[in-house]
């Protein structure tokens, strides 16, 4: 019997090679125009609630305390949207790929990784990074609505040290992971002076979600999208367009 997960992984690998080939071909045509998707800070990114519950795989190199923080942070965001989003957190041993996009194309898991090896996109000024595979589903008054179909979270353990409480040149693990899981839920930008601030500091310890952010996220999942107010967030967003309707977006938490 053919394993469906193996088939999905194979198809994603073929897709990856096809995208790389098309990008290489397109570089040979100076005047070639493409119809690739663009993503702005004013667009809405969320999960289709029919996708829930999700499984979040956890890199088995995290400590027991860090695993506990990951689960607690996930529960805080679930409480904010009043939806049971995750149903399990299995441990696994990841392959150490050299590029963040490989964790989407070459691995079916939606996971949080402890990147203790050097990864191309995790530069020395990036504390953590969340990447989302998103697909355009509709447009409302000039705003694009995307559904999230995959996530990967990377803690940049190669360049930085994380602990419980921060200070002494180290960053509070739970603060950082709470921020990153906010992106997993669809917070598509950075908001100053909140848990979703775009810069991390060794002096910042925040284990709660700001009321305004809770309300914004709740509204995205429970209110008619046509009624949502227009919001533009400050964003350290990097977009890799794949087709006219799909892209990989990455959110970078920078050191201060």
Image (cartoon, rainbow, N blue to C red):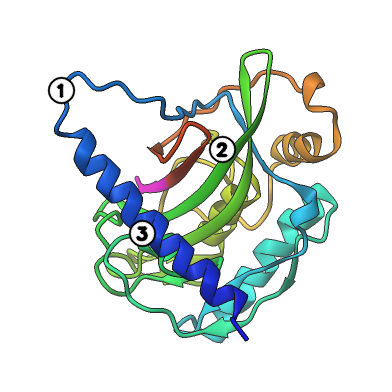
The percent position of residue 132, horizontal first and vertical second, equals: 52, 50
Q: CA distance from mark 1 to mark 3?
A: 28 Å
The percent position of residue 107, horizontal first and vertical second, equals: 46, 70
Instruction: Work out whether residue 41 or residue 209 is closer to the camera in this orientation and state it.
Output: 41
The percent position of residue 47, horizontal first and vertical second, equals: 69, 47
Residue 77 figure quarter: bottom right
Instruction: Work out whether residue 72 or residue 85 is closer to the camera in this orientation and state it.
Output: 85
What SS does tag 2 mark?
Answer: loop
Whether residue 139 can be seen here? yes
Q: Tell me the chief SS of the magenta region.
A: strand
Q: Which residue is mark 1?
A: 30
Q: Is residue 235 above or below residue 210?
A: above
Q: Is residue 171 above or below residue 139?
A: below
Identify the image quadrant of the N terminus: bottom right
What SS does tag 3 mark?
Answer: loop
Identify the image quadrant of the C terminus: top left
Q: Which residue is mark 3?
A: 100
First in sequence: mark 1 vs mark 2 = 1
Residue 254 belongs to the span the image colors magenta = yes
**Alpha-carbon neighbours of circle 3 within 10 Å: few (<14), some, or many (≥20)?**
many
Identified at 23% across, 34% down, the residue is 26
Labels 1 & 2 near each other (Cβ < 8 A):
no
As drawn, the label of residue 188 is 2
Q: CA distance from mark 1 to mark 2?
A: 33 Å
132 left or right of 220? left
Identified at 73% across, 34% down, the residue is 216
First in sequence: mark 2 vs mark 3 = 3
The percent position of residue 98, horizontal first and vertical second, equals: 26, 66
């Amino acid at each position: 019997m053919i394993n469906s997960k193996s088939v999905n992984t194979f198809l994603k690998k073929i897709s990856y090679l096809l995208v790389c080939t098309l990008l290489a071909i397109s570089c040979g045509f100076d005047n070639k125009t493409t119809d690739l998707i663009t993503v702005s800070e004013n667009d809405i990114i969320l999960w289709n609630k029919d996708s829930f519950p999700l499984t979040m795989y956890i890199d088995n190199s995290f400590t027991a305390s860090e695993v506990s923080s990951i689960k607690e942070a996930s529960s805080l965001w679930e409480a904010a949207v009043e939806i049971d989003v995750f149903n399990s957190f299995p441990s696994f041993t990841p392959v150490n790929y050299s590029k963040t996009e490989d964790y989407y194309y070459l691995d079916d898991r939606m996971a949080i990784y402890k990147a203790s090896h050097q990864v191309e996109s995790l530069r020395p000024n990036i504390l953590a990074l969340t990447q989302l595979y998103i697909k355009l589903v509709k447009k409302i008054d000039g705003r694009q609505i995307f559904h999230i179909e995959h996530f990967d979270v990377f803690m940049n353990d190669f360049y930085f040290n994380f602990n419980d409480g921060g200070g002494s040149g180290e960053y509070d693990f739970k603060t950082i992971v709470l921020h990153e899981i906010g992106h997993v839920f669809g917070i598509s930008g950075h908001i100053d002076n909140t848990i979703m601030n775009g810069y991390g500091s060794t002096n910042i310890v925040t284990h709660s979600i700001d009321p305004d952010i809770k309300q914004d996220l709740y509204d995205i999942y429970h209110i008619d999208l046509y009624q949502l107010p227009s919001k533009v967030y400050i964003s350290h967003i990097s977009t890799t367009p794949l087709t006219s309707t799909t892209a990989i977006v990455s959110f970078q938490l920078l050191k201060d």
